[in-house]
Amino acid sequence: MIVQKYGGTSVGTAGRIKRVCRRIAETVRSGQQVVAVVSAMGHTTDRLIALAQRVSETPPARELDMLVANGETITAPLVAMCLQGLGVPAISLTGPQAGVRTSRQHSKARIREIRPERILEALEQGKVAVVAGFQGATEDLEITTLGRGGSDTTAVALAAALGADACEIYTDVDGILTADPRVVPEARLLTHIGYDEMLELAAVGAKVMHPRAVEIGQLYSVPIHVRSSFHRRTGTMIVAEVPMEDRNRVRGVAHEKQVAKITLLSVPDRPGVAAAVFEPLGAHGISVDVIVQNVSSEGHTDLTFTVAEGDLAQALALVEGVAKEVQARGTSHSLGLAKVSVVGTGMLGTPGIAARMFRTLAEAKINIEMISTSEIRITCIVEREDAERAVNALHSAFELDQIPAPA
Ligand code: ADP
Ligand code: ASP
Ligand code: MG
């Protein structure tokens, strides 16, 4: 059994849907059971969000989910009817029909459970189950979505729940590259990448995979093959163990352009303040990235952190409340920032990677506003207008353009 996920560009037009269906038909004819997870066609999700913003200044999260879930709901029946026309029995299912049960956090719900009875029934009847990605429902059938790019997560979660042999993610690039090929033309295809590395890359902006999909893949040991829907060459295997010969110290550079920064000014330096600030953000599903606390002077300190630009308004509202509670002097914020990161498990125990990153940015005259690290990642916050230059400079400084092309 195989789960195949087809992204927005791959199903962007009627012609492309037909091509995807021929591919599914071939897989069926080779004797495999297929669950196909599909995204909204092309830029449908963006268009629906823009439409909502034209009728409402702040579209309520519940109604927005009711709206944007429809993108995927359109693609699934189109794929199912096209397959039937090719003589392949198929049935379309919405996320809720496919048994995707989620938390209640609208627009960033998490899959809690999958009850795949309808899928199993379809497969037993020899049908392809065509599942609308990105969407699910809570216990009381409220419609939710899994966050932008969330169809990947539907696919990997279904592969895990069904015990599928593999999960293929079909997209509009050759696989996982050393950087976003739209920004770095010299980016190279990686034949393998570890779950850890892919998770870090996805979490800091490599949107080719939804971070939660990688996390579920790792948790349930689902081998994930990311590949192009436009040709037949193998792409990238996301696996636990990367073959030795594939190892570079830095494996990839990622960037994220929609970053905002919030500062709490002159906060009393005492236990519990950081918890008071970050708990409400967490409770509202807002993830906080780079956090910097200045050295305390006269018992007060500044606390600065970044959030996704889309979360800024909500984050500010929460933080302004807390600022009063903890007797901070006030808050400030700025937009127009970006995050640039280098990732690789080979960085562990290799001194000098951070120095090389900072030197490279310095030579490119790019100012670093904030820094954060994990064991296998270094992230710098820079001005948005410098982001693409930074990514290209780092890509060549770490010799990622020297990786030989796969045989
Ligand atoms: P889909 O609609 O198939 O889910 P996405 O647009 O979500 O496709 O993801 C694919 C895009 O991710 C690519 O077109 C590419 O611009 C971008 N991308 C960012 N970082 C990387 C990377 N390291 N490797 C490959 N693609 C990347
Ligand atoms: N259609 C959704 C989005 O554009 C989900 C996805 O494509 O994975 O974010
Ligand atoms: Mg995607």
Image: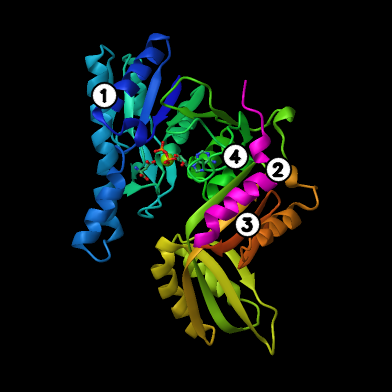
Which mark, by number, is residue 379?
3
* Whether label 2 touches label 4, CB < 8 Å: no
Give left or right: position of 192 versus 60. Answer: right
Give the amino acid at mark 2.
Thr
Circle 3 crowding by C-alpha within 10 Å: few under 14, some 14–19, many from 20: many
Report, in whole angstroms, how far the alpha carbon at label 3 lies from the one at label 2. 14 Å
Q: Give the range drawn in magenta.
A: 384-407
Outermost residue, bottom side: 298
In-front residue for pair 90/189: 189
Give the amino acid at mark 4.
Thr
Circle 4 crowding by C-alpha within 10 Å: few under 14, some 14–19, many from 20: many
Which mark, by number, is residue 345?
2
Outermost residue, left side: 55
Q: Where is residue 293 in the image (x, y as percent from the top left)?
A: 64, 74
In the image, residue 215 above or below residue 86: below
Which residue lies under the disc numbered 1? 80
Q: Is the magenta stretch mostly helix, strand or loop?
A: helix
Which residue lies under the disc numbered 4? 178
Q: Residue 352: in sight, yes or no?
A: yes
Question: Where, by quadrant of the figure, is residue 223 drawn?
Answer: top right
Report, in whole angstroms, how far the alpha carbon at label 2 lies from the one at label 1. 41 Å
Foreground mark, 2 or 4, reads 4
Earlier-in-chain disc, 3 versus 1: 1
Q: Position of residue 276 (x, y in %)?
A: 54, 74
Q: Residue at x 24, y 21 (%)?
A: 82
Foreground mark, 3 or 2, reads 3
Report, in whole angstroms, how far the alpha carbon at label 4 lies from the one at label 1. 35 Å
Give left or right: position of 232 versus 177. Answer: left
Foreground mark, 4 or 1, reads 4
In-front residue for pair 396/162: 396
Earlier-in-chain disc, 2 versus 4: 4
